[in-house]
Amino acid sequence: MAASSERLIGGCLCSAIRYECMEAPCDVHYCHCRLCQRAFGNVFAVFGSLPVSALSFSRGAPQLYRSTPYAERGFCGTCGTPLTFRYLRSEWIAIAIGSLDHPDAVRPEVHWGIESQVPWLALHDTLPRKPIEGEPEYMVWRQPPE
């Protein structure tokens, strides 16, 4: 977690979008779920959460994509950098830790979505590992079309 005097700022690859966190993110976590794997084009994502009111965009604003009926993801419309994740009914938003100017200022606390972790990925830490399957908002995208 960042020191209280340290501002957490970040943005996208092309700098069209810049943001500032008014408070340090909490619940910093790896997410191995299939949705995050696809959204990031990688085998996991790392997020940290903060109140929506504590995130300020100083340049540009993310494009929003509703990835499930219950959630939206923010990304740069120019370079494609994934930036945010938010459940629509929530007062909280998650930022992509890799989009921070100094991602080393925060540290993950847990692995989520471990049922989708690729078997060749070896992260040798002692963090708790939890499944996300069964979470109602996550499961909606897994429902077969009618």
Image (tube, helix red, strand yellow):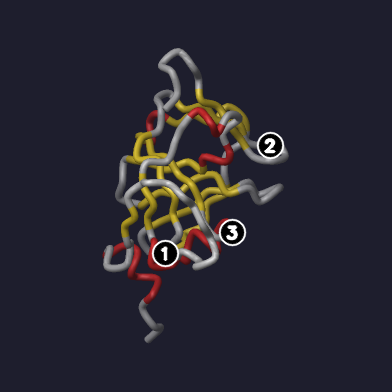
Tell me the element at label 1.
strand
Mark 1 or 3, closer to the camera: 3
Q: Which residue is mark 3?
A: 42
Q: Is residue 101 above or below residue 40?
A: above
Question: Which image quadrant is residue 72 in?
Answer: bottom left
> Residue shown at 48%/47% (left/top)?
46
Q: Nearer the viewer, residue 122 or 118?
A: 122
> Residue shown at 38%/31% (left/top)?
53
Q: Quadrant of the C terminus?
A: bottom left
Amino acid type, label 2:
Ala
Judge left or right: residue 46 versus residue 28.
Answer: right
Q: Residues within 10 Å of mark 1 (few under 14, many from 20)?
A: some
Q: Which residue is mark 2?
A: 16
Amino acid type, label 1:
Thr
Q: Is residue 108 above or below residue 141?
A: above
The percent position of residue 145, horizontal first and vertical second, equals 40, 83
Tell me the element at label 2.
loop
> Residue shown at 37%/46% (left/top)?
126
Q: Quadrant of the N terminus?
A: top left
The percent position of residue 74, horizontal first and vertical second, equals 53, 48
Mark seen at residue 68: 1
